[in-house]
Amino acid sequence: MSAILLFATSCSQPGNVTGNVASHLWAPVAYADVTVQGTNVSSKTDVEGNFTIDAHIGDTLVISLPGYRTTKAVVNSEPIKATLNYNLKTVTVNEDNTITFKYSAPNAKSVQVCGNFFQLENGTFGEGIATMERDGDGLWTYTTVPTLSELYRYEFIIDGNYTIDATAPYTIRDGEVLRNVFVVPGEIGDLTMVQDVPHGTESKVWYLSSPGYDRRMSVYTPSGYEQDRGKKYPVLYLLHGGGGDENEWLNLGRSAQILDNLIAADKVQPMIVVMPNGHIGMTAAPGENSLGYVGAKSSRSAIKTEPNLYEATFMDVVNYIDKTYRTIPDREHRAICGLSMGGGHTAVISANYPDKFGYVGLLSAAVRSYSKDDPRSTEMTQDFDMKLEQLFSNKPFYWIAIGDEDFLYEANKAFRAELDEKGYDYTYLESDCGHVWKNWRHYLSEFAKYLF
């Protein structure tokens, strides 16, 4: 709960009682109402939280602000301290799965809420923005139509300025942007949340890459891994998209919660999940590498590298995991899948190491035609048809999933046409919506059920 502190100085003469209203973090609170109880005498705090009011020693000041619990303070010869606790629930999921948003901004001219919970013309839910309605006290409100079970994100726009909901601690970093999140309960939403089931362990692991510098990955080990030291496990290598890093599948993808819940329900096999950083020139996630808190976006290419170096050195990750963890180190017990950029990485890695991965998943993958004439062609993408032929000769479980509104839909369609022309066996899942985490969390939960 946010607290507001009131400091007031007073004397026996009216008109010169002054004070300042600040939050518990000592930030000024603007536009709070200060009223002498039982009178019409009132004042407001300015943008620095200061106020002046006509009052006498012994008068009671009533301090209020929409979204806060009203409090009182008695004027005396000493500075007055009072707390004003925040009690506004910004996001409420109603029984009918509508969502009500509230925001306190008494002097704002416009407040909008945006996020991925809006019903679109085609009936699906996706990105949108809505103008909230203001009441007489400066409290802004908006209620959606009934939504579906899901993990959603939201932000506010105040007079044209983007802001997160500072009253809610539930945030996730998406690339370089911080966003608030909430869950509409149900089968899909519940799958992303911590349930009363046995839990795996999430670790941040540094390893020496063959280019000569340390890099970091995230590793999930299932419940029981630390206790049963004689048991070995299959491994899923789970790759992120272009805006992500080694934290993305854990944070936005909710991979640990999904795996915990599916394993507990006996819907997937207990497995180790390895989530490397897919930007080979990035040692670790922004703010968690040697660059500190500057250049979050530029840290992706802090170390200059050659194209496809990530794919070419991917066995650094596999070899480290097999050496460090209790794995079953063969293709029948090794899977790889990735979303977007990570899907493109998956296509190239699996083709170049055809005897290493028995399961391959492309999730909204950034695939293309890897022809010899492509100016982006490297040793890893040359002779791609021949590499695919060798991969499919090993009969992998090859899984492709994409949304029908995804901007990579046509590229995936063309890639599947190439596989069809060669008669290669694969499984295909097409869903609604586009290039969104809603799909990728769902794809992970489905792909994992086929493994091992």
Image (tube, grey):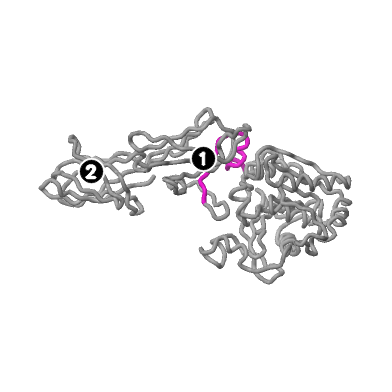
In the rendering, at what x and y percent does residue 5 appear?
29, 49
What mark, if any, has residue 43 been given in the picture?
Answer: 2
Residue 153, how many percent across, how many down?
A: 54, 43
Quadrant for residue 410, please give it.
Answer: top right
Which numbered circle lies on residue 290? Answer: none
Residue 40 image offset from top left, x and y in percent: 19, 36
Q: Is residue 279 magenta?
A: no
Q: Is residue 72 above or below residue 360?
A: above
* Mark 1, residue position: 129
For the residues carrying marks 1 and 2, which lies nearer the camera in this image? 1
Magenta span contains residue 196: yes
The magenta segment is 178-197
What type is the residue that disc 2 sits on?
Ser
Secondary structure category for the residue under label 2: strand
Q: Quadrant of residue 307?
A: bottom right
Residue sitting nearer the eye, 195 or 138: 138
Name which residue type carries label 1. Ile
Q: Viewer-proximal residue, 232 or 55?
A: 55
Q: Distance of mark 1 from mark 2, alpha carbons?
A: 35 Å
Rendered residue at 65%/45% (across/down): 435
Q: Is residue 324 left or right of residue 22?
A: right
Which image quarter is the N terminus in? top left
Mark positioned earlier in the residue sequence (1 or 2): 2
Q: Is residue 164 left or right of residue 397?
A: left
Query: Label 1 crowding class (10 Å Cα cut-off): few <14, some 14-19, many 20+?
Result: some
Q: Where in the figure is residue 318, as x and y percent of width and height?
A: 74, 60
Element type at marker 1? Answer: strand
Q: Is residue 158 above or below residue 432?
A: below
Q: Is residue 349 left or right of residue 277?
A: right
Query: Which of the two residues, 149 or 258, is positioned nearer the viewer here?
Result: 149
How dense is the environment of label 2, judged by Cα within 10 Å: few (below 14), some, or many (20 and up)? some
